[in-house]
Amino acid sequence: MNDAGAVAAVRAYIDDHRAAFLDDLAEWLRIPSVSAQPEHAADVRRSADWLAAHLRRTGFPTAEVWETEGAPAVFAEWPSEDPDAPTVLVYGHHDVQPAALEDGWDSDPFEPVVRGNRLYARGAADDKGQVLFHTLGVRAHLAATGRTAPAVNLKLLVEGEEESGSPNFRALVERHRDRVAADAVIVSDTGMWSRDTPTVCTGMRGLAECEIELSGPDQDIHSGSFGGAVPNPATAAGRLVAALHDEHERVAVPGFYDGIVELTERERQLFAELPFDEAEWLRTAKSHAPHGEAGHTTLERVWARPTAEVNGIGGGYQGAGGKTIIPSSALLKLSFRLVAGQDPERVEKAVSAWVAEQLPAGIRHTITFSGATRPCLTPLDHPALQSVARAMGRAFEQDIRFTREGGSGPAADLQDVIGAPVLFLGISVPSDGWHAPNEKVELDLLLKGVETSAYLWGDLAPH
Amino acid sequence: MNDAGAVAAVRAYIDDHRAAFLDDLAEWLRIPSVSAQPEHAADVRRSADWLAAHLRRTGFPTAEVWETEGAPAVFAEWPSEDPDAPTVLVYGHHDVQPAALEDGWDSDPFEPVVRGNRLYARGAADDKGQVLFHTLGVRAHLAATGRTAPAVNLKLLVEGEEESGSPNFRALVERHRDRVAADAVIVSDTGMWSRDTPTVCTGMRGLAECEIELSGPDQDIHSGSFGGAVPNPATAAGRLVAALHDEHERVAVPGFYDGIVELTERERQLFAELPFDEAEWLRTAKSHAPHGEAGHTTLERVWARPTAEVNGIGGGYQGAGGKTIIPSSALLKLSFRLVAGQDPERVEKAVSAWVAEQLPAGIRHTITFSGATRPCLTPLDHPALQSVARAMGRAFEQDIRFTREGGSGPAADLQDVIGAPVLFLGISVPSDGWHAPNEKVELDLLLKGVETSAYLWGDLAPH
Ligand SMILES: [Zn+2]
Ligand SMILES: [Zn+2]
């Protein structure tokens, strides 16, 4: 079958089945699988059961509910009939953010409703819609190619605690290391630049977090009697913060940038070609000026440069009025976003050593790290990334551009444990309102996701 | 009468009257005049009434209770019979800090008890004991000199809200500007270096206080999506703190030191000769290292150098664990101790201008000043200061040394409004436990206070 024929076949299949697909999605969206609210624990389980049953109906020979210390995940696999087919693992999540009508929803968040091209419901875009497009996608793939099994060994892992920080995900993946083994991971839990500019995300930043406690006097002391003659831990906290960056807004912790994968000229150019409106971006950031590392654009700063940010600072008297004390202690919460080539453990060691060196005599400290996540990045010329871009390009009938993601996610655990490249395939747009009232998915884009999925498995398989 | 005769006469009078004096003091100490606790408002009034009556019994022709917006003060005057006698105003306070047996007192804080040389009670040293020694003092002065009125026009102003921050004191003094007019002010609400090293305090630092609110994003934003590309107000707060001092720990606000009265070589030498034990001082400061302006000793730093201290800092997430946000705002509470030659208003202007200049685009701020107090300082060679040192020297039979006080107090209001030098006469020692459980006064030192008062009025009068 030539390309035009394949596209026509996929589209015809999707047209024939879209109504049933949307009915299925609506049924799933009616289950309020809010992982952060204990009263919805049974709903999260019901959501997992629903998905496993749906995957079996789709044709997956295996679809299991996997228990964790917290909410259950769903795992399914559909082996290819080709002995040398590659294995692909799709990642998503079936839990959703909390939602209530009174938060500002125009209709019940758990009663899906279509208005025009949009399907409104909690989870429509994040992430049930983007998980489910793969099930119609794989059916369209089979129908259009005449196969009885996918061109790749297809696996799905859909967790139930992503909106609660994936506390048990790494352990789950490690426990089932053999079952989830794959040659590539497709994460369907992100979005694209915009309706007019479909994109593939090629990486996420990593994360290291720490809390620093600084102790000065054994108790708050009088700033008249002692001020000017003993070290003040709040002052020490401020000086640490100030010393975090140099005058070019580069992180000043020695060794911090060691080994990082710098942006290539091509990537910088691709970023620069995106239709980026800084004023609009600032509105999204609720901020009043851009600010960051010298020599980099805003997009480079948030996608491809490591950072040090103060998430919290505290010490001394913070109530109304004044209190003339030298506080006994101060607290800093710092987070470091990391890019490819940076290792959270190495960064933690560098930060620890740096902090110890900065503090004056008389200020004692403790530093505690938590929540490390590795960065992930797939090079632009990686064949699997090219496959995703090609499949998406066929669906959208235009060239696909490349983005990255400034945040950090459980994708990095998959990359770590499975040792495979992670690719991000999402059709959500910024206006979809993730975590907000009136979350929605654009129906035509959702079906482009189905279509992309239908093309992808053949493209990933050896020709 | 020669000097030995005068001393003998004063001491004989004190010996004869000490028992009655201590009974009177005990009676006053039994009144729990805690200005900070509304349930003691009636006790504070009772304390004022008691004192006014006591002053009338002492012989003051006028002793009035003065109303304020808060607790009442007591004013008394006893004119000299010499037409060219100078006028002296004694300042003290009749309110006390809160105290309860369960705070760790060995006996009821409002049931005075003598153990050995010590009288234990809340207010024994701060400040009832040090107010009352003037009443026996003036009687001894009259008895020893054969006068029927003091050698100076003697005024007493004893406020009732000092332990609550003297919120109405300045207004009170301004309202009664004519009545409190004086050529010198004697503040009896401080202490001396130690039992073995009697001292006169020659000044207090002033104070300027401000709160700075820094605003960045309109709400907390995600440090993954936006980190590294917008200004962070907690970072800005840290940088302000760090920029407050230069590498010599001098305050880096331009103009901050303009016009300050530098320590003379003689003063530095006098400070250096005091039996100062830095390790012991650090224990008192509950601190683990000295730290401060280069080129100055600890005593110089706390007594005679201006400072900038962070009293409070806050912003972002301060709870348990981490939260990857860029906070919307941050808060700084700063206080500046000032020395002679510094004007709080000028310092406030300098700080305001400096803050505005430090902040990056995208960080808005407000700065609010409160609680300004002027510094006060009497030169070592001032005749009234020499009088106090001489009177004290006769009582203690040794040379009196000079100290300063790092804190700031309502004395500065008296200096401002009355336009007279302020001298500090106190016999309390550091172990007296001001504001702490088991506050006490050493009885022999209390009587040295009586004796000093007895000598002082004659010394201050023209010969
Ligand atoms: Zn999601
Ligand atoms: Zn006092």
Image (cartoon, coloured by chain):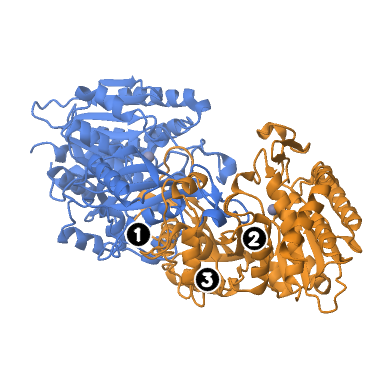
Chain colours: A blue, B orange
Question: Disc 1 designates what residue?
Answer: B229
Name the side, left or right, on which B316 lies relative to B382. left
Residue at disc 1, secondary structure: loop
Asked if both marks, 2 and 3, belong to the same chain, the answer given is yes
- The Cα–Cα distance between marks 2 and 3, rounded to whole angstroms, is 46 Å
Residue at disc 3, secondary structure: helix
- Image spot of residue B50 (x, y percent): 87, 50
Name the side, left or right, on which A151 lies relative to B336. left
- The Cα–Cα distance between marks 1 and 3, rounded to whole angstroms, is 27 Å
Question: Disc 3 designates what residue?
Answer: B352
- Give the residue at x 81% y 54%: B136
Depth order, front residue of A76/A369:
A369
Q: Chain of mark 3?
A: B
- Image spot of residue A299 (x, y percent): 30, 59
Q: Amino acid at mark 2?
A: Gly
Query: Is residue B168 visible in this depiction of the protein?
Result: no
Q: Quadrant of ligand 1?
A: top left
